[in-house]
Image (spheres, rainbow, N blue to C red):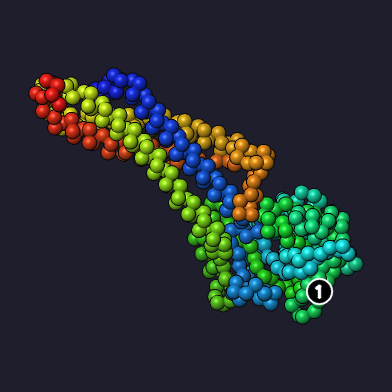
Amino acid sequence: MLKLALRNLSRNRWRSGLTAGGIAVATAMLIWTEGMNEAFLSEMASSVTAVELADAQIHARDYVEERSIFHTFGEDAVPLDRLRALPAIDAAAPRVLLFGLIGNEQRSRVGRLTGVDPAMELETTRVARSITDGRWLAGRPARDGEPRECVLGRTLAGELKARVGSELVLFLQAADGSLGNDLLEVVGIARTGNSMLDRAAIYLHIEDAQFLGALEGKWHEVALRLDPKTPGAESLAPVKELLDTAAAPDEIVLRHWSEIVPDLADMIELSKRSIWILYGILYFLAGLCIFNTQRMSAFERRREFGVLLAIGVTPRRMAGLIVLETVSLAAIGGLAGVALGSAITWYHSAYGLNMGAFTSTGDGSFSYLGVDFAPRLYFRLTPRMAIMPWATLFALGSICGLWPALKSARIDSVRAIAGRT
């Protein structure tokens, strides 16, 4: 039956070839589009979490409701050494978050002061690797009489006309009600890729920030980088157990990044679901192509079908032959599409897609929702991306061949041979 089905398909090579080619192109487009979409959404999430949020954060419950300088916690509530030792945690970094006025005699701006442990922050986020001029913070805080080191966001540095080596004055309200102020020396300028951070970020050593804010030994948050093998929210269970044993459950809050910025998480989920509209259109067009081809083939071969029925071929075998032809056509076109789509997607996963062709700047750099994307987008390719379109089209081919098969199996052999149908 299979040999006969393939022979029948080869009798009209142009029509079969065009149909198989259309299926191949649709399959390749499905694989390539999904690989690009997965890469784009992954890059968006990574660009947001890699420079500030990390994969999860720990806060005092009151700080979640009101971002106040007074809502802090210490290592007694969040044992950092035990936390970093958990298998699910790749890195953890404590932070102090303050707001203050920074400037010089010519100009000043309101900035967001982030006190970090330079070594831990380097492990947890990529902000230290975003330095475009100068260097990252030193491993120790400033000694008495020395200016405190700081790293500025690129946009903030431009607005202040500050360069590496510039000295700036910082004023802020401390937790004890006093006015914290000190001299800062700019040692680095960072381009994080997040427009909000670049416009307001001021990084300095966590002990310097605690001194300025009168927060001795206190933190506002701990950022967590999870094991890449288990990056989902379910991997936070052992962290939650540790925090519950160290502090009262209602005092400390552990949140995955999707809970911190639910709008972004919802948008990513919506994008993943809405892409199915495009997939549905491509599947519909491929199915229509298969159906039309088999319908025309069955119409042209009605006399042949009449002869086969007259010499004893059962209607069931007749219908099975036509369905087998349809499935073979879909399978051949689908396999060609899998090979083509996987090859192109693999190439873009290895060498990236130059986004310069889609931007007005020509250099490939672009931003979306305040997040900068790399000039080259590296696709993702998984076995599921290749198998699912082929399997779907295989099933679709079977369905599209049913109507021509049933119609042909029910013809009157005498009238068909005589050419009256």
Residue 76 or 285: which is nearer the viewer? 285
At a point 61% along the width and 51% down the height, the residue shown is 368
User: Mark 1 packing: few (<14 Cα in 10 Å), some, or many (20+)?
Assistant: some
Is 238 placed above or below 294 here?
A: below
Residue, far right: 145
At a point 63% along the width and 62% down the height, the residue shown is 223
Residue 259 or 406: which is nearer the viewer? 406
Q: Position of residue 380 (x, y in %)?
A: 53, 42
Q: Which residue is mark 1?
A: 180
Q: Quadrant of the C terminus?
A: top left
At a point 58% along the width and 48% down the height, the residue shown is 43
Q: Position of residue 21 (x, y in %)?
A: 40, 28
Tell me the quarter of the picture where residue 407 sits. Answer: top left
Q: Quadrant of the N terminus?
A: top left
Determine whether, in the image, residue 224 is placed left or right of residue 295: right
Tell me the quarter of the picture where residue 148 sits. Answer: bottom right
Visible residue check, residue 97: yes
At a point 54% along the width and 61% down the height, the residue shown is 263
Is 397 placed above or below 52 here?
A: above
Q: Position of residue 151 (x, y in %)?
A: 78, 58
Determine whether, in the image, residue 248 is placed left or right of residue 194: left
Q: Amino acid at mark 1?
A: Gly
Secondary structure under the numbered disc 1 in the rendered image: strand
Is 292 placed above or below 245 here?
A: above
